[in-house]
Amino acid sequence: MARSLDDLKPRIALVEIAHDFHARGWMAGTAGNLSARADDGHFWITASGKPKGRLEENDFLLVRVQDAEVVERGRAEDKPSAETMIHRAIYELFPDARACLHGHSVDACRAADRAKKGARSLRLPPIEMLKGFDIWQQDPKVDLPLFENLLDVAQIARQIETRFRKKKPPLSALLIRGHGPTVWGASLQVAYNRFECLEFVFNYVTRGAK
Amino acid sequence: MARSLDDLKPRIALVEIAHDFHARGWMAGTAGNLSARADDGHFWITASGKPKGRLEENDFLLVRVQDAEVVERGRAEDKPSAETMIHRAIYELFPDARACLHGHSVDACRAADRAKKGARSLRLPPIEMLKGFDIWQQDPKVDLPLFENLLDVAQIARQIETRFRKKKPPLSALLIRGHGPTVWGASLQVAYNRFECLEFVFNYVTRGAK
Amino acid sequence: MARSLDDLKPRIALVEIAHDFHARGWMAGTAGNLSARADDGHFWITASGKPKGRLEENDFLLVRVQDAEVVERGRAEDKPSAETMIHRAIYELFPDARACLHGHSVDACRAADRAKKGARSLRLPPIEMLKGFDIWQQDPKVDLPLFENLLDVAQIARQIETRFRKKKPPLSALLIRGHGPTVWGASLQVAYNRFECLEFVFNYVTRGAK
Amino acid sequence: MARSLDDLKPRIALVEIAHDFHARGWMAGTAGNLSARADDGHFWITASGKPKGRLEENDFLLVRVQDAEVVERGRAEDKPSAETMIHRAIYELFPDARACLHGHSVDACRAADRAKKGARSLRLPPIEMLKGFDIWQQDPKVDLPLFENLLDVAQIARQIETRFRKKKPPLSALLIRGHGPTVWGASLQVAYNRFECLEFVFNYVTRGAK
C-alpha cells in the first residue's frame, strides 16, 4: 500500500478510491464520479456509466477546465460523467483544488432531509470531526452549502458557480439534496480524508433521528 | 478482477455475486437465488439449499424457460431453487432479461412493512438513485410492484405473471413482503447494479423510520 | 475455500467461524464461544479468554459431554470457556447436535429488551427467513426461548436443561437477555447458517424500533 | 496472523490496529491516535495528521512520559499527535498501562449526547459485554468518566489527571463528548479487546434511541 494516495498516479489513486467507496455503499450501481487535476488547465474524470467497484485506469477522460471540452479518452466510446460540469466549476472556482469526489450516500440524503425545502445550507453539528476540514474553533457554527437536485445537472453547476463566486463556502464541500456530497481538496489524500469526515458527520446527524 | 460481470462466464459471475451479496447480509444462511439466461430458451439457476458464501460453479442447474424442466445439473442430487418458478416467469415475460437476482434483506422487509396490507405497490422516494433504473425525470413517482409472501411460491409466480402481463412494471424489480427483492436486467452487470441501487433506496426508506 | 464448513476439520471450521463472526461484530473482545462434537461423548470448545479474531486451531479443549470434564487441551494453561456448561447441556439434550455457536450481538440484546422482564420467550416475526430454521408454515408463530442473564453461568445451563427436558424448543436456538444467542445444528454448516438467519431476524426486529 | 497483538513489535501492532479501526469507521480522515509504552519512561505515539488507513511503522514518535518531550521521531518533519498530553497522563496515572487507543466514533458521540451537559459520567447498561472490562457482577452499575470537549487538548489532559488522581475510574476507559473514547490496558491486545467491547456498548446504547 502506498503511504499516501498522493504517491500514486492520479488515475490509479481514483481507481483505489472508487473501489473503496463502492465497498462502503457510497457508489452503488454506477453512481458517483471522481476527478483529479492533471495540470492547471485539465482534469481526469470518470467516464459515465461505469460500475465503480470495477473501475479501471482506462475509465477516465481528460477534460479542459475552461470549457469542459474532452481532449483525451481511455476508450473511444466513453463519455464524460453527467456531472462533469460540477467538477469543472470546482476546478475553476478553487485553483488549489487538485481532486474532487462525488458520491451518493443514504446518510447524506437523510441529513439533507433535515433542512427545510429551499434551504441553502445545512448547519453541521459542532463535533470534533469538523477539524478534518481545518475548522479549529470551540463549538464551531459551520453551514454546509446545500443545493436542490435538478435533472439538468448543468443548472446545478451554474448555481454552484454563482453562489460560490459571491461567497466562498466555509468548508471544501457541498451537498445536493436527495443525491450526495461533493468534496474537494488540495490533494487526493486530503479530498479522500474529508469525504470520510463528512460522511461521519452525516451519519452522526442521522443517527440522532427522532 | 474482470472489467464487467458480463466478461465472465455466467455461472462464474453468479458465484461472484453470491459471495458478494452474502458478505453484505443479503443472502443469510442459504437464502436467495440467482440465475442467468444461458440461451433464449434456458437459464442457469442456483441449486436449492446452498450457503451462498460458499457457492461454486457446479451449484447450478440448467432449466427450460418454457416449463421449468431441469435439463442439466452440476451434481446429481441437486434440486433447483424453490423459487425457480419466479425466475422462469421473469424470463418468459421479459425476453431482454439476461439475469435475475433474488435476495433477502432487512431493509427490503422493513420497507415493505411501510405499505398497507394488501397494497400492490410501494411508492419509492424520488431520490437521485432511481436513475440507476434508467428513470430520468424530475421528482419521479415510481411504484415498485409488491406481492404478499405465500408459502406456495408457485402461486406468487402466477400472480407475478398475471399482473405483469396486464401491465409492465415501471422498473425491472419487484418486492415480496417479509421476504426480499427480485431484480432483473439486460445483462449480469446491469442486474447487479440495479440490485445495489434498490437496496440503497430501501435503506433510505427505512432510515427515515419514525 | 471449502465447499462446506463440514468439509473441514471441526476445529479448523470453528476457527473460520470465529474470524468471520468477529469481523461482523458478534464476538467483540474475547466474547463468545464455539464448539463442535468430536464424537458422541465429547466436544471441542474454545478456550477461555481468546480474542476470536485471532483464534487458532490450538485454542480448543476436548470436553466430555457427560460431566464437562476436560480430557485434552491444546495448551497446558488453557481453561474451557465459562459457558462450557451451556454447550454441554445442548449436546446432552440434543444427540443430533454436532455444533453449537454462542455470540454476543447488539441486535440480539436489543431484541431481547422487547420482551417483558421475566418473559420466557420472544415471539419472532413471521418473515421468510424463519425457513432457515426449517419452519415451513404460512405466518408461523415461533417463540424463541429466552433466559435471564445470570453471573452464575452454570445456573443458566441448569435452567436450559430443566426447561428443554420438559419441552423441546421450536427451533435450535435460544437467547440470553443482555448477552446473546446460542444456536446449534446437525452440522457445522447448518449451525453457521442458522446463526446468520437468527441475526437477520434480530436485526429486523430492532430496525422496526419505535 | 500473529496469535496476539502482543506477539508483534509494538509499532507494528499499532499499525495493524490503525488499519483495522480505520476500516470500521473509528478513525475517519486523520482522526484518532494510538500509543504503546516502549519502556517505563517512554511511549510510542502516532505522528499528527496521518491517514490511519495508511499508517506505517515510521509514523510514530518516541515521547517521554515525564514531560511529553519527543526523544525520537520516524521522520524529521513529524510532530506528535495533538492528544499526546492525554496519552502521557494515562501512562503516568496508570503504571500498568502498556497501550492507549483513542478513536472517534458516531456511536460514542451519540452515547455521550445522552448524558446531560456538564455530566461527569455516563452510566453504562448492565449488559454481559462489561465483562470485557473485568467487571464480574450481577447487574453492575458502571459509570464511564465523561469529559467535555475543549479546543485546548492540554486542558482536557489536566482535567483527566486531576479527576483520576482523586479517584480511579471503574474501568480503563474514558469518553470525551462529541469526540470519542480513550481506552487503555495492560497489553496491546487487552486495550484492543476493550476498545471493541466499549464500542459494542455504545452501539447498544444508541440503538435503543427514542
Image (cartoon, coloured by chain):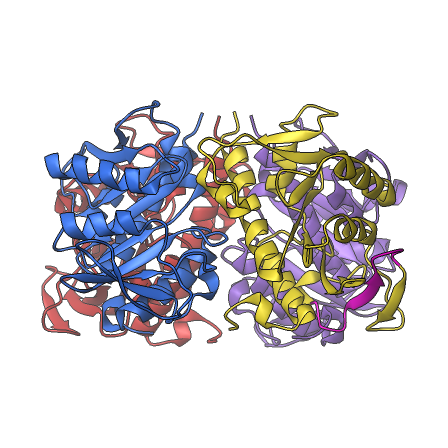
Chain colours: A yellow, B purple, C red, D blue
Q: Is residue D184 visible?
A: yes
Nearest to the observer: residue D203 or residue C155: D203
In the rendered image of this protein, does residue A45 appear above or below residue A12?
above
Q: Position of residue C180 (x, y in %)?
A: 31, 45
Q: Dividing the image into 4 quarters, which one contains the C terminus of chain B?
A: top right
Nearest to the observer: residue A120 or residue A59: A120
Q: Residue at x 30, y 42 (%)?
A: D154
Q: Position of residue C61 (x, y in %)?
A: 18, 68
Main SS, magenta residues:
loop
Q: Residue at x 72, y 76 (%)?
A: B9
**Residue C177, quarter of picture:** top left
B83 vs C139, left or right, is right
**Residue A105, quarter of picture:** top right
Residue A59 magenta: yes
Q: Dividing the image into 4 quarters, which one contains the N terminus of chain B?
A: bottom right
Residue A97 magenta: no
In the rendered image of this protein, does residue A109 appear above or below residue D3?
above
Q: Position of residue B172 (x, y in %)?
A: 79, 49
Q: Residue at x 17, y 36 (%)?
A: D162
Looking at the image, how many numbered discs can be counted on the residues?
Answer: 0
Q: Residue at x 31, y 24 (%)?
A: D118
A143 vs C31, left or right, is right
Q: Position of residue B7 (x, y in %)?
A: 75, 75
Which residues lie in the magenta part?
A55-68
Nearest to the observer: residue D190 or residue B161: D190
